[in-house]
Image (spheres, rainbow, N blue to C red):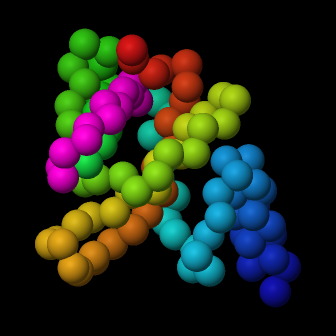
C-alpha cells in the first residue's frame, strides 16, 4: 500500500533528523512546535522536568518524565514516558518543540 510506505518513509525521515534510534515500535509523535518550552536537568529520582505553554510567561510542567532528548538544528524531540510506578510503564510517545521557542 503506497500510503503506508509513505507513512513509514516520513517516520524514518523524522527519526533520521533527530538521530533517534527506535526500539522497533513506531511511537505517536505530538507536534508542540507552537509552544514555548524549557527543561531542567535534575539529579534526583524525579528525573528531568519538561515545561511548556502557549504563552511565554506561563510555562507549566509537563506531568510526565522524558526518557531522552534529541536536538536538531531547528527542532528538539523528547521521548516521553508516562510512568505508573518504578516497574510498570503504560505509554510512550515523542514530542517535538521548535528551538526558536526555547526559554532559558
Q: Position of residue 81 (x, y in %)?
A: 34, 63
Q: Is residue 89 left or right of residue 74?
A: left
Q: Which residue occupies 65% across, 64% down?
A: 21
Q: Is residue 39 magenta?
A: yes
Residue located farthest toward the front when viewing the structure as drawn: 43
Q: Which residue occupies 33% across, 72% down?
A: 91
Q: Is residue 17 left or right of residue 58?
A: right
Viewport quadrant of the C terminus: top left
Q: Is residue 90 magenta?
A: no
Highlighted magenta segment, given as a residue range: 35-46
The answer to whether residue 14 shows anywhere in this view is no
Q: Position of residue 5 (x, y in %)?
A: 81, 77
Q: Is residue 20 left or right of residue 58?
A: right
Residue located farthest toward the right when viewing the structure as drawn: 2
Query: Between residues 102 and 57, which one lies in front from this camera angle?
Result: 102
Count the numbered circles shown.
0
Amino acid at each position: 500500500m503506497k500510503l503506508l510506505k509513505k507513512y513509514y518513509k516520513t517516520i524514518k525521515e523524522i527519526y533520521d533528523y533527530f538521530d533517534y534510534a527506535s526500539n522497533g515500535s513506531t511511537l505517536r509523535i505530538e507536534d508542540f512546535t507552537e509552544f514555548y518550552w524549557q527543561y531542567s536537568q535534575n539529579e534526583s529520582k524525579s528525573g528531568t522536568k519538561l515545561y511548556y505553554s502557549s504563552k511565554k510567561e506561563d510555562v507549566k510542567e509537563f506531568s510526565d518524565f522524558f526518557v531522552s532528548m534529541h536536538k536538531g538544528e531547528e527542532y528538539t524531540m523528547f521521548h516521553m514516558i508516562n510512568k505508573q510506578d518504578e516497574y510498570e510503564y503504560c505509554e510512550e510517545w515523542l514530542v517535538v518543540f521548535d528551538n526558536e521557542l526555547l526559554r532559558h
